[in-house]
Amino acid sequence: MNPLSMAVATAPQIELKDGLRSPAFDDVYFNTDENLADASYVFLEGNNLIQRWEAQAHEGVQSDVFVVAETGFGSGLNFLLLMKLWQQQKNKPKQLHFISCELHPFGKKQLSKILAQFSELKTQSEALLSHYPNGESIRFGFYRLQLFDSVSLTLMVGDAAACYQQCHAQVDAWFLDGFDPKKNPKMWSNSLFQQINRLSKKGTTIATYTAASSIRRLIESQGFQVNKRKGFGKKREMITAVMLDDVEPVACKQNWAPIKAARHHDEIVVLGGGIAGLSVARACTLAGQSVTLIDKDEPMQGASGNPLGMVMPHLTAQASPEALFYWRAFDFAIHAYLSDSDIFQSIGIKEWCETDKKQLWKKTLFNDHLWPEALIQSSKQGVLYPSAGVIDTQRLKDQWLSYTKQVVVADVVGIKKEGEHWLLLDSHHKVIQSCDVLVVTAGIHSLKFLPFESLPLVPKHGQVSVIESDKPLPFSQVQRHQGYAIPMSKHRCLLGATFDHMNEADWFKAPLLDASHSERNANKWDGFDQWQLPEYKTIFGKAGIRTTTPDHLPVCGNVVDAVTFEQEYADLHHGRHWQQYPEATTHEGLYLMTGLGARGFTSAPLLGQLLADMILDRTLPLEKDLCQQLHPNRFLYRQLKKPPQ
Ligand code: SAM
């Protein structure tokens, strides 16, 4: 599986006979008579979970999150049982994260039918199903689902070894549940167990129903001490194991794009109060941290302060990192916004496809007919994104600001590292704030700070206009064509957006509203004879800066020390193998998120989660290859790969 292929996984063939059987693997998912007791005995008791949670709850800080990983998600029954046990347990770490992989995922309807028979797991099943990917055909890749405040799931669709190779996590306990090793050797391969080793640490445990000696040897070869235990019911034995020592870190393919947790994270400061900053603050706070937000203006005054913002996927005709990222981000954003009240309205976005280019795009997109209907539908004149919609930015600001410990309004002119701390300085070199972790989310202003000055960010001057008409507007969904029109009420809509080049001298100045904004935004509808704007008057306009990147993807991750990197990677253009280069040195505790362009409301929540998980060394919501596509160091790496001029 190429993790970025976006290919559709094949759904499983199943037989419902005394439980759930797979004819292809000639093995059972579960037997109806004993499945719940069987799975609880093997996986929950086998990993000694209750005792470990109680012990960890006493230890405090170290045990904020407990991570369980599985091979073979199937019907999710093991996960639901685990979740139930977790919810019943009083003394436990603050959060539970479950990771699983599945080569043949059930479609949502099929899964719903299977789970309906377990009335004792109703609450858990409903939570899973309300977040489970839509449709009966599910695409390869990672899905991050937040089921409850304290329970999250990373579901990786694809082959187990390939998925775990893309996974960044620290696992506490493993459920090895990949069918009988003789019938499905791929789930017990050496390459998968190398990943199990890489993702484990001292004290990590394994439980599996098999007692095969080949599997025992495989587990032992990866540094685990194996114990045999009485098997469930008639089964004689099963295996449990524990990792004895810390695992040696292995060289990873992303040497130039390192993912590094912060050494300390008591004080996290986010510099930049737009949707990017609020998203990081929210994700860090939900993960149990306290966050200070700093901006020279009140939060959400810049481009994020348009009265409404669109949230929609951006599907390129062919599979691309861009399409993959925005599709994931869209799913994640909708769930994040819907978890707070009245921020997001899913009114649907209609995209008109009138040019030949757009028609071709649409044709290619629908050729395989496998996008879920909830994501995109073909319509006569174009496509409809039925679940897409609009954000009320004022409400979002009011609700998401509550995720910050404090908001500081101050003009930061420089940042510097002193000892273990990052200092934020004013124009008199006075310290405004000091912190362990600094996340810069300052759009184009990020370039003012030293480690970022050479990033190839491109600012665009963008303006929106609010117009009002005596006649009712001829649409109730968002319309996209050359520009867009977002209905605000029966007679009022937001038109957008100009997107102009900026001279370098103006990059850091407050963007001015140009008198012709509304005419220019309305002109984008010229020649669009499906509907005309009625007579209108302009009642409001707003100018902002959208920070874009040459490859149309945002910038998100650790900040690399560019000077050292250029020295160490100077001969990259000769084509030496990546393994021959050291891991790039990062600025400890410094992170960046910028370049969100005009799609910030779609991309920011997932990027915020990604950064929070990076900072806190938790399971990342995206494949490592996709993190690499977003890495701030990608531009310098690509530059050094080219022969010098
Ligand atoms: N844990 C599951 C549950 O709670 O319902 C049951 C898992 S079932 C025994 C094994 C699962 O492994 C099946 O869903 C099967 O499709 C999946 N599987 C088989 N080969 C795989 C592979 N190479 N990579 C990922 N998953 C695989």
Image (cartoon, rainbow, N blue to C red):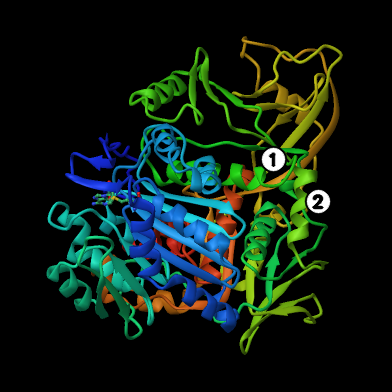
90, above or below 375, in the image: below
For the residue pair 133 and 357, the one nearer the viewer reads as 133
Q: Quadrant of the C terminus?
A: bottom left
Q: In this rendering, is residue 466 above or below 46?
A: above
For numbered disc 1, what is the local secondary structure?
strand
Q: Position of residue 583 (x, y in %)?
A: 37, 76
- Residue 418, above or below 409: below
Q: Are marks 2 and 1 in contact (CB under 8 Å)?
A: no
Residue 68 at x, y percent in the picture:
42, 65
Q: CA distance from mark 2 to mark 1?
A: 24 Å
- Label 2: how many Cα within 10 Å (few below 14, some 14–19, many 20+): few
**Residue 453 visible here:** no
| Viewer-side residue, 326 vs 54 | 54
In front of the other: 60 or 323: 60
Residue where numbered disc 2 is placed: 398
Residue at 74%, 35% in the rendered image:
464
Residue 222 or residue 577, whichever sits in front: 222
Would residue 206 be visible to someone looking at this image?
yes
What amino acid is labelled 2 in the image?
Asp
Name which residue lies at 43% across and 39% down.
Answer: 117
Q: Quadrant of residue 91?
A: bottom right
Residue at 66% across, 27% down: 347
The numbered mark, 2 or 1, whose residue comes first in the sequence reads 2
Q: Is residue 184 left or right of residue 40?
A: left
Mark 2: secondary structure? helix
Q: In this rendering, would 554 be left or right of 576?
A: right
What residue is disc 1 on? Answer: 462
Locate residue 433, reporting x and y percent. 76, 77
Task: Inspect the image, locate mark 1, and give the three-letter code of the amino acid beneath it.
Answer: Gly
Q: Which of pointers 2 and 1 indicates the residue nearer the eye?
A: 2
